[in-house]
Amino acid sequence: MSGHEIRSLSGEDELRAVWPLVAQLRPEFDEDRFVVQIRRQIDQGCRATVLFDADGAPRAFACWRVLEMLAVGLHVYVDDLVTDQTVRSRGYGKAMLDWLKAEAKRLGCVRLQLDSGTQRRDAHAFYLREGLRIEAFHFGIALGE
């Protein structure tokens, strides 16, 4: 991988342009629902960050936020992280994760954290290679209506 740019997006047209990439991770959404949801999350402090390759194609996407919790202190929590499946293992995911780590440090955070679905074994192998460790179980329950 040579030459890339990482930047945050917030405009509707920019977000729509990266939808095909995000859809690889979140196929349960459609483009319109994604744009509404991500803009609401941005309004709540989330950041939508994209790595573009030298030709301007979006290759990795991260939705992340800064949180503070008693258990871990000030940290970056990564809601979503996806690398374009057509160019995996070319360094884009690593570059995005390295940028997220550096940005977390720049913001005074002491940790970077994320959850990953149990079925995403390739992602788990990547995170472990990049120094992340399995530190807890995540529990949840649907509350219904």
Image (tube, rainbow, N blue to C red):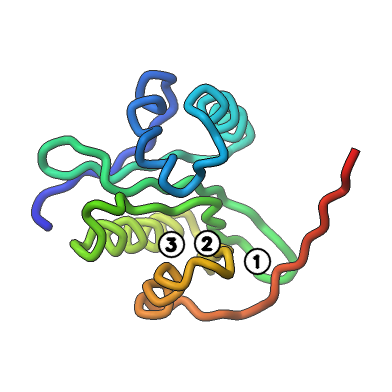
Q: Quadrant of residue 126?
A: bottom left
| Mark identifier at residue 109 | 2
| Mark identifier at residue 73 | 1
Q: Position of residue 21 (x, y in %)?
A: 36, 41
Label 3: how many Cα within 10 Å (few below 14, some 14–19, many 20+): some
Q: Position of residue 85 (x, y in %)?
A: 30, 53
- Of the residues under marks 1 and 3, which one precedes in the sequence? 1
Label 1: how many Cα within 10 Å (few below 14, some 14–19, many 20+): few
Q: In this view of the protein, which residue sits in the foreground, 38 or 73?
A: 38
Residues under numbered marks 2 and 1 in contact, where contact means CB atoms less than 8 Å apart? yes
Left or right of residue 8, residue 135 in this image: right
Q: Position of residue 8 (x, y in %)?
A: 38, 37
Disc 1 marks which amino acid? Gly
Residues under numbered marks 3 and 2 in contact, where contact means CB atoms less than 8 Å apart? yes
Q: In this view of the protein, which residue sits in the foreground, 72 or 125?
A: 125
Determine the CA span between mark 1 and mark 3: 13 Å
In this view, 44 is above or below 100: above
Give the residue pinned by disc 3.
105
Q: Position of residue 133 (x, y in %)?
A: 51, 80
